[in-house]
Amino acid sequence: MKIKIAELFYSIQGEGRYMGVPSVFLRVFGCNFKCAGFGMPRGELSKEAEELAEVSHMFDKYEELPLVSTGCDSYASWHPDFKNLSPMLTTDAIVERIIEILPHGEWRDEHLVITGGEPLLGWQRAYPDLLSHPKMQGLKEITFETNGTQEISKEFGLYLHTWAHHHDKDFCREITFSVSAKLPCSGEKWEEAILPKVVCDYEEYGTAYLKFVIATEQDFTDAEHAIAVYRKQGFTGHVYLMPVGGVETVYAMNNRNVALLAMKHGLRYSDRLQVPLFKNEWGT
Ligand code: SF4
């Protein structure tokens, strides 16, 4: 089996439940959204990704790509004009590269983040092959960073169940779905982005939590509405508020306000440690 890999790197998880945990990030190619509304006045869409796509021939690798201050900060992981930067690798080759970048050449306390793009599109069919590889046996914690719109396939669901309910605890794996549900500030349509049944179903296979990107009071009003909709469907997981900002200037403008908002409403705050620590550069 093969997976188209946008990035594979080792860093510290900067967001959500595993903030601060050493992690291997497997960023797969492809997304069903564009999220061009991030960082823009409401109703307007960013052109940064499209403008960069027009000069995509100037870039040979991810590290050369400019950061954007509006729109999706991982635009090259789904924009077709950058697909040549993402090789299609066999699961064996991916495992070998993972083992190479782990500090001890084997899994110890590190956690695996499968991100994107949107990682629960068609690549679900390749994950059992990847995660069952003998060199992946020491891996105990996996997070899927998803936008919460993709159902788990029947085949992958059966596979996930075997971990969650294995009688031998050495075979159990902790599965987390970090659901960054897209509010209207993303530029995506509510009815396509807020799909409570899909997210409630993730709770059958592990721990799911919601993470909302917040820039303005209107975003928080939208988040409250979304939380009510998810809860009504039966969602039981935690909710995090996270400041908008793929670049430090934008992040620094609202991280404290979002933290205060989370405290005021008894919700969890997620930082974006990769922004102050590593400037959110590609590969961090
Ligand atoms: S869902 Fe995530 S990866 Fe896809 S466009 Fe939106 S922010 Fe980018």
Image (spheres, rainbow, N blue to C red):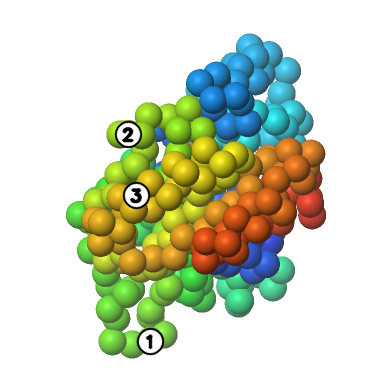
Tell me the distance, in whole angstroms, between the alpha carbons under discs 2 and 1: 38 Å
Residue lying at the far left of the rendered structure: 154
User: Which of the two marks, 3 or 2, is nearer to us in this view?
Assistant: 2
Residue at the location (38% across, 80% down)? 171
On the image, numbered disc 3 is attached to which residue?
124
Q: Is residue 193 visible?
A: yes
At numbered mark 1, what does the secondary structure look like: helix, strand or loop?
A: helix
- Per the rendering, the mark at residue 169 is 1
As drawn, is 137 to the left or to the right of 86?
left
Q: In this orientation, which residue lies closer to the viewer: 2 or 36?
A: 36
Of labels 1 and 3, earlier in sequence is 3
Q: In this orientation, which residue lies closer to the viewer: 145 or 123?
A: 145
Relative to residue 4, is residue 23 depicted above or below?
A: below
Q: What residue type is labelled 2?
A: Glu
Q: In this orientation, which residue lies closer to the viewer: 95 or 155?
A: 155
Residue at the location (59% across, 52% down)? 242
- Per the rendering, the mark at residue 233 is none
Image quadrant where residue 193 sits: top left
Q: Which amino acid does label 3 sit on?
A: Gln
At numbered mark 2, what does the secondary structure look like: helix, strand or loop?
A: helix
Of labels 2 and 1, earlier in sequence is 1
Q: Does the residue labelled 2 lie within 8 Å of ligand 1?
A: no
Of labels 3 and 2, earlier in sequence is 3
On the image, numbered disc 2 is attached to which residue?
192
User: Which of the two marks, 2 or 1, is nearer to us in this view?
Assistant: 2
Q: Does the residue labelled 3 lie within 8 Å of ligand 1?
A: no
Tell me the distance, in whole angstroms, between the alpha carbons under discs 3 and 2: 20 Å
Residue at the location (68% across, 40% down)? 246
